[in-house]
Image: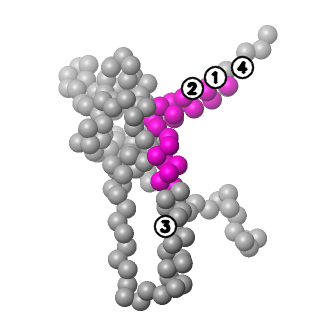
């Protein structure tokens, strides 16, 4: 590695805004999963800087995917339908960004290209493996642990 490449500031696998916002919204909905109480888009937007129109599109995609349900009326909002423990981060990525399609290989296959694409495929599989290990519930648990750690009381 060259000195000019700062690994902390380099991201190979980028988290799309759509997936990031969806995960934040799902975390908020997971807070109310046990009570089955709806959460409004305004409630989610108040906690996270997500434009409401974009959030509406994301929640609509999640509704079509069967992850959330919308309720109309004065006590309306969105409810998480799937149990947070059953919803992996990889599923959310695929729901919103779509499955990655294989690149069409050119007719110019050679050893070097095969080596390079093989390594990239390994990196992709590693990312998929990690994202499939974590669920929305894991994010909730980690958030709760960090909140507990931050609430140190001194006498």
Q: Is residue 63 left or right of residue 93?
A: left
Question: Callout 1: helix, strand or loop?
Answer: helix
How far separated are the C-alphas under marks 4 and 3?
44 Å
Marks 4 and 3 close (CB-CB < 8 Å): no
Q: At which x and y percent is residue 73? A: 20, 22
User: What is the number of the mark on residue 148?
Assistant: 1
- Please state which of the two labelled residues, at mark 1 or mark 3, is closer to the viewer: 3
Q: Which residue is mark 4?
A: 152
Residue 4, compared with residue 134, is above or below; it is below
Evaluate if marks 2 and 3 touch, with contact meaning CB atoms under 8 Å apart: no
Circle 2 residue: 144
Say if 52 sits above or below 94 in the image. Answer: above
Per the picture, the main secondary structure of the magenta-coloured stretch is helix
Answer yes or no: do the residues labelled 1 and 4 have beta carbons within 8 Å? no
Q: What secondary structure is marked by label 2? A: helix
Q: Are marks 2 and 4 in contact (CB under 8 Å)?
A: no
Residue placed under numbered mark 3 in the picture: 121
The CA distance from mark 1 to mark 4 is: 8 Å
């Amino acid at each position: 590695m060259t000195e000019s490449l700062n690994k902390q500031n380099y991201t190979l696998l980028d988290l799309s805004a759509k997936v990031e916002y969806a995960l934040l919204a799902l975390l908020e909905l997971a807070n109310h999963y046990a009570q089955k109480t709806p959460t409004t888009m305004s409630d989610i937007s108040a906690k996270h800087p997500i434009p409401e129109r974009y959030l509406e599109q994301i929640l609509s995609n999640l509704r079509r995917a069967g992850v959330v349900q919308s309720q109309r009326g004065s006590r309306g909002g969105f409810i998480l339908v799937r149990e947070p423990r059953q919803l992996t981060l990889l599923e959310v990525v695929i729901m919103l960004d779509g499955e990655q399609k294989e690149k069409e290989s050119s007719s110019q296959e050679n050893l070097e290209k095969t080596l390079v694409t093989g390594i990239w495929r390994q990196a992709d599989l590693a990312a998929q493996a990690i994202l499939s290990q974590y669920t929305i519930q894991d994010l909730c648990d980690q958030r709760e642990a960090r909140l507990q750690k931050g609430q140190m009381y001194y006498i």
